[in-house]
Amino acid sequence: MCGIVGWLNWNRDLSSSGKVIDGMVDTLIPRGPDARGQWFENHIALGHSRLAVVDIEGGKQPMTRTRAAGSCTITYNGELYNTEELRKELLLKGYAFQGHSDTEVLLLSYMEWGVDCVTKFNGIFAFGIWDSRNESLFLVRDRMGVKPLFYYPQTDSLIFASELKALLTHPQIPAEINAEGIAELFMIAPARTPGNGVIRNVKELKPAHCLLMNRQGIQIWPYWQLTNKPHEDDLKTTIEKVRYLVIDSITRQLVSDVPLGTLLSGGLDSSIITAIAANQYKGHNQVLSTFSIDYVDNHKYFKANDFQPNPDAPFIEKMSGHFATNHYAFFFDTPELIDSLENAVLARDLPGMADVDSSLLLFSRKIKENVTVGISGECADEIFGGYPWFHRHDLQNAGTFPWASHLNTRLQVLSPELSERIHPLDYVNRRYQEALKEIPYSNTDQGGENVFTRVGYLTLTRFMPTLLDRKDRMTMAAGLEVRVPFCDHRIVEYAWNIPWEMKNYQGREKGLLRLALEGILPEEILWRKKSPYPKTHNPQFMLGVKEKLLTVLNDPSSPLRDLVNLKNIMTIVENPESNANKPWFGQLMDTPRLFAFLYQMDFWLRTYRIKIV
């Protein structure tokens, strides 16, 4: 993967803007440590930092190709998984290739099919193409939003980049947040409203959207969206199709010119990927590398609960032994997790998922010592109904986002003055209602609404991006490319219309997916009860983040103090168990993670020199 930046300005010659582009690219070096490049032409400047995975020599960027009508130049972050099919199609149309990179295939696809090329791509990507033939800038983001893309539009210019830190390096973009940005941070985070860049006037190009800027202005449109179709396949046919799509997606994503491995938790999703990858490797007389994460002394403190019914270690050992993988087990201690909270903010550019982020950052660094590409099981839960809110009526009927239904905890944190300014409940409700209006209900949904359609859509478009953001930022901060085959749009399209009764086979979370993979996984793995990403259960974590937060709150210069209700926070600090069974986000973010998040908030405000306007 890579980092991309660009600057278009109709009223300025940017041919001498190398220092600005260099500064932006500098911030993205962790995303692309292998090479960097710049390209300039009158009103446009492009930059790139590269992580070389395919066609090490021939894939250098920014890349320019010329046809009779003129030239086009691309800066691209991503992977195409149907590269060879597109290459064959372009060869038949008379195109010649200078290398075998997917970058060149993507660029020539644009030159052949124009903006409609995006409908042909199977992959994860964010890119910008300058078309000198008609003086236009074309920006695109993949269908699920696996790869990030932010931009700062003005009347006569547009600046874009893979990450917020690169935009904030540009001298024309101030590090400011207004009431909406504050509301996002305190009431929505670590999720983010699609399209919202948090920083004032910064926007995110939404997943499955295109942006075209020319001298007439900016156009933005979706090139893909979920559509309702009658599901006419019986259970047997549905199982066969799901099995085919999952295996095909994983197999396509094993292509790499550098070492590759899988992230293995012993859960259903990562085990499916590992099994299919290991069998492919075995067929080529190779051994797959697998990687797992755990925490020092976690076995001493683990207590089973509804969210985490059992530890991962025995299942990881079973999988690694069964498929004869070369397994690496990494263990991190509590001080490491706490010390990495700040680095996690620097990677995400925002306060995030606390140690859920920092542990993945540490894990990614260790993985990168052994391979450059990883494959991970994110998004199967969103697609096949794995989360508690697909199965619990109280969460389904919470009247808000089901993974953040305990709004009182968030309200307690806010100072009265801040509450009066941002109207927190109104803000959350507005964002929730916006999401509800987008849902494509089918004609067969009773009363115009199907609860599983609603929950499924909200999860795909409002919860899943949080995990994809986390995965991209933490792994790319370590120069590790991680692919997510369950995000293949073909799987999403097909699964979207499968009735809940099929998905929930035998009343089990992801029951259909389990049924579809019978014979590939050992039975005890196939039917293991869902367990989320592992977190530390060591009580020292609570003590450590509480101490960090108290240090911040006792510092008169802390920018956090003016935003929070000190009295209420101290009450929670003194009695953290009062909210123990009410995670304030998802399944993992409980009271200690709230403390860590607030500490991250203070660090972010200081380090990024955020001005509240």
Image: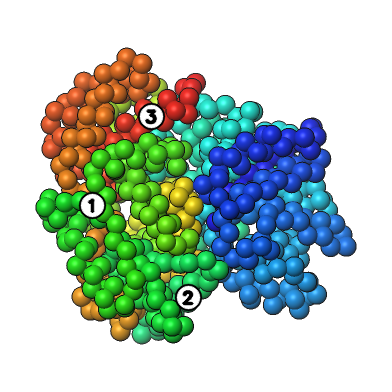
- Between marks 2 and 1 in the image, the one whose residue lies nearer the viewer: 1
Disc 2/disc 1 C-alpha distance (Å): 31 Å
Residue farthest toward the front in the current orientation of the protein: 369
- Residue at image mark 2: 251
Residue 238, position as x, y percentages in the image: 39, 80
**In the image: residue 542, left or right of residue 205:** left
Which mark identifies residue 496?
A: none
Q: Is residue 155 above or below residue 557?
A: below
Q: Earlier in the sequence, mark 3 or mark 1?
A: 1
Residue 258, position as x, y percentages in the image: 52, 66
Say if residue 564 shows up in the picture.
Answer: yes
Disc 2/disc 3 C-alpha distance (Å): 41 Å
Q: Quadrant of the N terminus?
A: bottom right
Which residue does the image show at 71% across and 61% down from the upper left? Answer: 107
Which class describes the residues within 10 Å of circle 1: few (<14), some (14-19), or many (20+)? some
Residue 442, position as x, y percentages in the image: 44, 64
Q: Is residue 597 above or below residue 565?
A: below
Which residue does the image show at 21% across and 40% down from the upper left? Answer: 541
Which class describes the residues within 10 Å of circle 2: few (<14), some (14-19), or many (20+)? some
The residue type indicated by label 2 comes to Thr
**In the image: residue 522, left or right of residue 297:** right
The residue type indicated by label 1 comes to Tyr
